Amino acid sequence: MKCFCRVLIAWLPLAVVLTVPSRTSATTILDITGPNYVPSTIGSSYFQVVGSAWSIDQEYNDVSITTVLDAISGQSSGTAYLVTQIGPGATPASEVASSSFSVTGSYTPTTLFTGLALPTGTYYLVLSSSNEGLGWWGTLQPVVQAAPGVVDVGGIVAGSDRSIGPVDYNYPPGSTFDGPFAADQGASFIDITGSEAPEPATWVLLICAVVLSSLTDLGGLWFRKLANAFCGWRCLRLDRDRLPEQELH
């Protein structure tokens, strides 16, 4: 005789998994917009390096990072670095990813990275170029949209015309940077999207649901024994109460 407790054991984990909110859809991690000011020059005769920094307090998957760039001279190219450390001493060991990009035309949304997995921490996006006609659009009146636990740390800049220190021509993230700057001192446009990484508890429930679903032959001997162990005397009593009267003697 099938027992209610057995049914509950079989389907409760799956029911819980199905009711856990999905976190796989893309969401805005950080988005900085606002009235256009002027593009910050990248490269030029001063080999200026420009960056933006933010921090997150949870892991994100499938992260994409898009900026708005300008090929001031008609066509320009550069290199993007996503790192967890900047300044003298920074090496490729702190690099999450890097990519080359090219821009044609003015005010061009440019996706620099896709498919990234970012654990909790602080990140720096650094753009460099050997051209003299590349710019990164920004604003003096930023509108910041950030997911809970995400902080816009601010903009950073390095250049050979600055008094604080030299530019690292071989590895631009290792330059000596000014900043981070407060948002009202200028913020570069950036759009970061991704999906929250599933919590471990969700995976545990999912595994339990799959395992138990594979054993859900309620008439099977082993599953009945497992159910009885969990349900105790309640299952046994229900089974007994449903037997024909003559079988009780």
Image (spheres, rainbow, N blue to C red):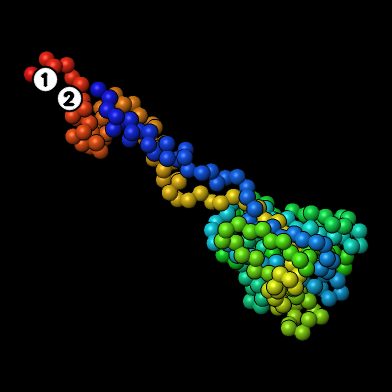
Q: Where does label 1 land, which residue? A: 248
Residue 150: assigned label: none
Given residues 233 and 99, the one toward you in this image is 233
Task: Say which quadrant the C terminus sits in.
Answer: top left
Task: Looking at this view, name the residue that lies furthest to the left.
Answer: 249
Task: Say which quadrant the N terminus sits in.
Answer: top left
Q: Secondary structure at mark 2?
A: helix
Q: Which residue: 18% across, 24% down?
A: 241
Q: Where does label 2 land, which residue? A: 240
Above or below 149: residue 22? above
Identity, as a three-letter code, of the amino acid under mark 2: Arg
Above or below 14: residue 221? above
Residue 177 % position (x, y): 71, 76
Comes first in the chain, label 2 or label 1: 2
Q: Which residue: 74% across, 53% down?
A: 111
Identity, as a three-letter code, of the amino acid under mark 1: Leu
On the question of residue 92 being in view, the answer is no
Given residues 187 and 41, the one toward you in this image is 187
Q: Quadrant of residue 112?
A: bottom right
In this image, 55 relative to 77: left or right?
A: left
Given residues 70 and 17, the one toward you in this image is 17
Check contact, mark 2 vs mark 1: CB within 8 A.
yes
Above or below 237: residue 35? below
